């Protein structure tokens, strides 16, 4: 099956913009792109020239990091750009749809609605696990993209590889399964919920989104990578602006991805995972906390006796957390990113001071303990 059979016919037929940088490479006197021949008043000499649309060194490094071929990869401005490109390429306004499993990351639905695509919702199960059979049953011919956030934001729950791959197989020829692995570096490496990036070559309808914004500490630089069948990559490149990656961003990404950067990142991932365990255990003992959801990400989502009071107490102390009460099934919850050990200690201290808000701590039998 050709995954492009699911794409918008008008996008498949689109003649993309051909930039000066794409048309001519090499040469020493560059008079083809209407750039300034002088370096900028302040800044690097390279900045006066348009950047490589897909910087070769960065593409090579990311392909090796994620274990895919260079033709199976697209670098863009964060995973957010990958989500947007997919929706625009595969969903015709007023006709096609995406499928999401709430509570989940909000950008899938926002991008779909901006595009005029319908959003089909198949809620997570009560234990926050992905309901593969219900998702499969809800995929009509209009649904072109099924988003799976693994680990999920805002619950933190990992998604078993086996469940994802079963869904990918079930939907072969019917829809692309887009696995958003923004937090995968924090998942237990020996657990069942590891990355499916290694499967991209084996399934034409599997797309994986990775980012340097979380574990690699580059949220401000905006570099994300989409891994997919080469035909999907080729289609998305047609839609992308000609020069998506600013030169300083590509340089910053390559620096972070150096051998030394990799060592530092691995150490920090270890710290985050230790802090997740330490904080998870400590928070669970607090009077104001009803439950700590099991997390495979760099945050913990807490059910509280009174989330509003806890949030206000934290804010008074200068600690900003994410209020996730607007999400279904999380009406009493806050999401707290794991910071440095000292920041986490401070957060814990403040929450320890939030008293008298718990009406009834759920017993082991009634507490929701997501898998
Ligand atoms: C699940 C998920 N996907 C994607 C993103 C966006 O990532 P990026 O910074 O790569 O655009 C986020 C940001 O919080 C996220 O939580």
Image: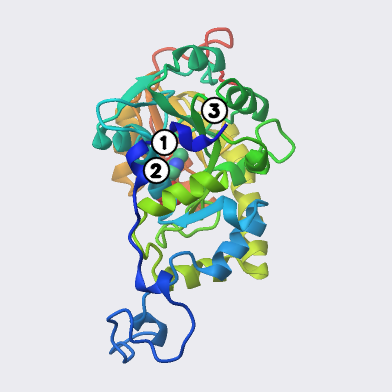
Report the mark closest to the observer, 1 or 3.
1
Q: Decide: marks 1, 2 in contact (CB < 8 A)? A: yes
Question: Could you say which disc has been placed on residue 12 in the image?
Answer: 2
Compare marks 3 and 2 and give the one earlier in the sequence.
2
Question: Could you say which disc has been placed on residue 132 in the image?
Answer: none
- Judging by the rendered image, the residue that carries numbered circle 1 is 7
Quadrant hosting ligand 1:
top left
Q: Secondary structure at mark 2?
A: helix
Vertical side of 170 occupied by 256: above or below = below
- Judging by the rendered image, the residue that carries numbered circle 3 is 284
Q: 71 left or right of 309?
A: right
Q: Secondary structure at mark 3?
A: helix
- Residue 13 position by quadrant: top left
Number of numbered markers: 3
Compare marks 1 and 3 and give the one earlier in the sequence.
1
Q: For residue 354, say whether it is visible.
A: yes
Report the mark closest to the observer, 1 or 2.
2
């Amino acid at each position: 099956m050709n995954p492009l059979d699911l794409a918008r016919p008008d996008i498949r037929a689109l003649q993309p913009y051909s930039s000066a940088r794409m048309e001519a490479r090499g040469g020493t006197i560059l008079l083809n792109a209407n750039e300034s021949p002088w370096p900028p008043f302040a800044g690097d000499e390279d900045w006066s020239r348009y950047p490589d649309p897909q910087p070769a060194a960065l593409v090579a490094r990311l392909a090796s990091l994620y274990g895919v071929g260079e033709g199976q990869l697209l670098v863009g401005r964060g995973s957010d750009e990958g989500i947007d490109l997919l929706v625009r390429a595969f969903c015709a306004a007023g006709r096609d749809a995406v499928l999401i499993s709430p509570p989940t990351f909000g950008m899938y639905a926002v991008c779909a609605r901006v595009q005029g695509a319908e959003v089909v919702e198949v809620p997570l199960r009560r234990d926050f696990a992905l309901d593969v059979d219900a998702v499969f049953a809800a995929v009509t011919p209009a649904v072109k993209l099924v988003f799976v956030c693994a680990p999920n934001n805002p619950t933190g729950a990992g998604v078993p590889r086996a469940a994802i791959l079963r869904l990918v197989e079930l939907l072969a020829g019917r829809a692309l399964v887009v696995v958003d692995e923004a937090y995968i570096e924090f998942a237990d490496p020996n657990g069942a919920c590891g990355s499916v990036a290694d499967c991209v070559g084996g399934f034409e309808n599997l797309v994986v989104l990775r980012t340097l914004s979380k574990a690699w500490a580059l949220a401000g630089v905006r570099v994300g990578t989409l891994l997919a069948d080469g035909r999907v990559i080729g289609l998305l490149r047609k839609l992308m602006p000609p020069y998506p990656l600013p030169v300083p961003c590509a340089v910053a990404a390559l620096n972070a991805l150096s051998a030394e950067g990799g060592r530092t990142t691995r150490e920090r991932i270890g710290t985050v995972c230790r802090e997740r365990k330490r904080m998870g255990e400590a928070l669970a003992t607090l009077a104001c906390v009803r439950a700590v959801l099991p997390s495979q990400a760099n945050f913990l989502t807490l059910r509280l006796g009174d989330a509003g009071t806890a949030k206000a107490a934290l804010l008074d102390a200068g600690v900003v957390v994410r209020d996730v009460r607007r999400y279904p099934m999380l009406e009493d919850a806050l999401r707290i990113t794991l910071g440095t050990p000292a920041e986490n200690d401070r957060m814990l201290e403040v929450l320890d001071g939030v008293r008298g808000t718990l009406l009834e701590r759920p017993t082991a039998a009634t507490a929701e303990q997501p898998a």
